[in-house]
Image (spheres, grey):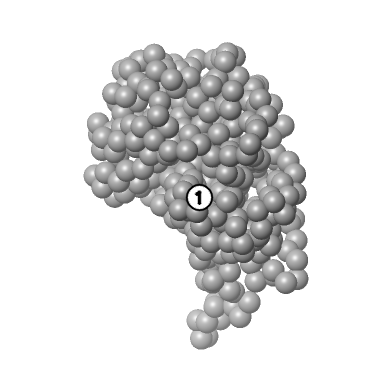
Amino acid sequence: MLPVSVSRFTATSCIGRGLDPTLAALLQRRSGLQRCAFQDIDIDTWVGEVDAVDDEEMEPELRDFNCRNNRLAQLALRQDGFADAVDAAARRWGRGRIGVFLGTSTAGILQTEWAFRHRDPISGHLPADFVYAATHSPYSLTDFIRRKLRLEGPAMSVSSACSSSAKVFASAKRMLDAGLIDAAVVGGVDSLCATTLYGFHSLGLLADGPCRPFSDDRKGISLGEAAAYLLLERMPGSLDGDAVLLLGVGESSDAHHMSSPHPEGLGARMAMEQALSSAGLSHAAIDYINLHGTATLNNDSAEAKAVAGVFGAATPCSSTKGATGHTLGAAGALEAVICALAIQHDLMPAGPEAGQRDTTMDIQYLASNRRQRVSHVLSNSFGFGGSNCSLVFGRST
């Protein structure tokens, strides 16, 4: 496939608002996870909560969109001059030629939880100021950001669980290839809520401490929240030396089980092979892999088998979810930003210290940060139901 320029990007998570604190946390191998104190949740687990999200104020004309997910989306949009970069792109291409493609798994479900807690005790009616379409609906996020950025091109939300904001790259690329748009805002936002915390707890998948991907004593995931955006544009005539490119996208649906991956990672392997093929690269060209790495027993094992089947044991890899937590529908975009930082700063981030590695897995999992030339990276995002996506990014020179 033809490369696409990633002209601007930003991320906000529990390790920081914007690129500088995010990079600093990766360099320091610092985790943003803390013992869960989110609202009145009564679960012994750790989460990656973003501070002061509820201090965000909505503009009067956007008050129907007021929910935690959209407040987090707004907070992140102000970082790293991203909104200004989109505005410049709109002047360059036209507002009707920029699409918006965002991923989320839960959208504003927290607002719905609040609404059900405040039903009329007699009639059972939900509060009059609860607006489902602008909060709970997965499209509410895309609609909100499209309005904030005053864009007029095609827009869609992708909700495929934990691969949501990786698959938006594929959706945007197809529209670019079809000539329907010249640029796209892609990304994802997911925020903490009782539904996901109690839901994963009921599945027995939450760790009782900070998650430890690929460790021999891993016990499950730590949920987090995040918002991340990237601006994709048609290739300009010239590029800066540190420019990042989207080179390849691979998607698969293995449909093995509603919540468990294929034990041999067959769907994951298909997505990685397709991403390499679309990028025109061999497995040996990939310098670093950002693993999906949720720290559950089955997921890490299946992904390790898939990676070993495609790359062997020579390619350095790691999961950064020990720093950010698993941000579900925002994970693909957040880790795409981490991959872009890895390329620009020649960094292979190992993630926080996590004890002994699981030596039954035949992959080169990084024990510490590695600083060396990073030209091509692959990022994995795998969702419930076998919805898999792999992305390949590279540098322009």
Give percent across and percent down for residue 362: 33, 17
* 14, above or below 74, in the image: above
Residue plotted at (36% across, 32% down): 277
Residue plotted at (37% across, 23% down): 282
Q: Is residue 160 visible?
A: yes
* 330, above or below 308, in the image: below
For the N terminus, the image quarter is top left
Looking at the image, how many numbered discs can be counted on the residues?
Answer: 1
Q: Between residues 310 and 201, which one lies in front from this camera angle?
A: 310
Which amino acid lies under the numbered mark 1 shown in the image of this protein? Leu
For the C terminus, the image quarter is top right
State the residue position of label 1: 176
Image position of 78 (left or right of 292): right
Q: Quadrant of residue 62?
A: bottom right
Give the SS element for disc 1.
Answer: helix
Residue plotted at (63% across, 36% down): 237
Q: Quadrant of residue 16?
A: top right
Image position of 11 (left or right of 294): right
**Residue that protrudes farthest toward the front in the picture:** 237
* 339, above or below 101, in the image: above
**Residue that protrudes farthest toward the bottom in the picture:** 123
Give percent across and percent down for residue 217: 40, 24
Give percent across and percent down for residue 383: 38, 45
Give percent across and percent down for residue 115: 56, 71
Q: Is residue 40 visible?
A: no
Residue plotted at (57% across, 13% down): 372
Q: Between residues 90 and 150, which one lies in front from this camera angle?
A: 90
Q: Between residues 223 and 170, which one lies in front from this camera angle?
A: 170
Determine crowd level at label 1: few under 14, some 14-19, many 20+ residues with C-alpha closer than 10 A.
many
